[in-house]
Image (tube, helix red, strand yellow):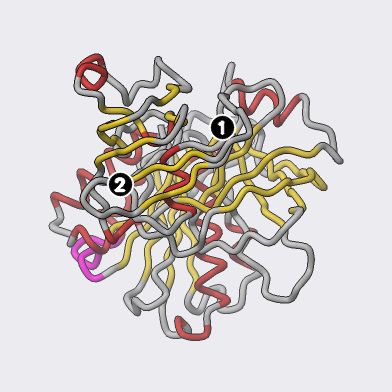
Amino acid sequence: MHSDGHVHRITLVASDQTVECEAGDVMLRSALRAGIAFPYECNVGACGNCKFELVEGEVEVLWPEAPGWTAKDRERRRYLGCQSAPRGDCTIKMRPAAHYAPKHTPRRVTGTLVARRAITHDIEEFRFELSDDMPFEPGQYALLTLPGVAGQRAYSMSNIAERNGRPRELHFQIRRVTKGQGTGVLFDVLEPGTRIGIDGPYGMAYLRRDVKRDILCIAGGSGLAPMISIARGVAAEPALGDVKLHFLYGGRTPRDVCGRDMLEVLPGWAERLHFQAAVSDVTPDSESVWDGHVGFVHTVAETVFGEKLRDMEIYFAGPPAMGESVQRALIALKVPFEQVHFDQFY
């Protein structure tokens, strides 16, 4: 990453606001650190939601092949905020949207791997102790800089922010991706005691503490982590004491199903916290007899909750195909858009 030790000033057209971008940082994140509501979703170059127009100055493009950046963008001097570092002072044009104003200022800290444990055959929990506090809302994610891996990887926290002054930890529940560079390093290279860079929190699909509707969390794959964080947040929040939370986990086969044990230990289990699971493939395996739901989670959610979904606050996280199916199903059921929360990961 371009880094000459200088701080470059980014000026926003039409608002005269300026942002200082430190060496090694990018336009989007330095703006969020300054409290500017810069629209974004994935933070890793895939979705294209953080585009801005470069009016004056020069930027370095960190990942020219980013899927969210097109040849047409290049011609129009449009760049991705998450993949652009200023080469000097710059003037840019972007449209802030209040929705994206950070609830917690993102910060760059060091995390030391202190523990890991298996959750399923391909999901593990990695616990990092932080060099400094990082307050976050349940459901948010952080960017990990892993040794030997270009760029950052976005992973959601599964714990909630402790308020008792212990060294702050972040827990990530991560699914091994076949041939995945990031998970390859996490699963096979990172030794306990290793330090990595962590930058966060980010993400807009966090627990809305002021909403008193019943909640449905839908998780698939490593979408487990942010949904577990939200469930833990609800259980720990006195103001949400009357809210019921339904947790629906979707796996391909019975051995993929997880999460129930994490909910069972929370206050309110069975009275107001409920867990159900669905699998899409029940080919008999030697490990388990499946007596839960069969089908894709979006179909199971429709069957179990039906029109009640319109009165619920819905959070979901999982593989892209699952996310798209859930979105389509909720639109078809006329669930109000503002009651549905998810972050676009790719």
Q: Write the residue at 32% across / 76% down.
A: 213
- Of 317 and 164, which appears nearest the observer? 164
Q: Give the alpha-carbon distance from disc 1 to disc 2, as whole Å.
A: 26 Å
Q: Write the residue at 32% across / 28% down.
A: 79
Q: Which residue is mark 1?
A: 152
- Residue type at mark 1? Gln
- Residue type at mark 2? Leu
Residue 147 relative to residue 152: left or right = right
Residue 63 colored in magenta in the image: no
Q: Read off the magenta span.
A: 305-311
Q: Write the residue at 34% across / 49% down.
A: 38
The label number, if any, that marks residue 12 in the structure image = 2
Quadrant where the N terminus sits is top right
Residue 88 relative to residue 22: left or right = left
> Residue 278 at x, y = what percent?
43, 46
CB atoms of marks 1 and 2 within 8 Å: no
- Residue 140, compared with residue 242, is above or below; it is above
Q: Write the residue at 45% across / 81% down.
A: 240
Q: Quadrant of residue 50?
A: top left
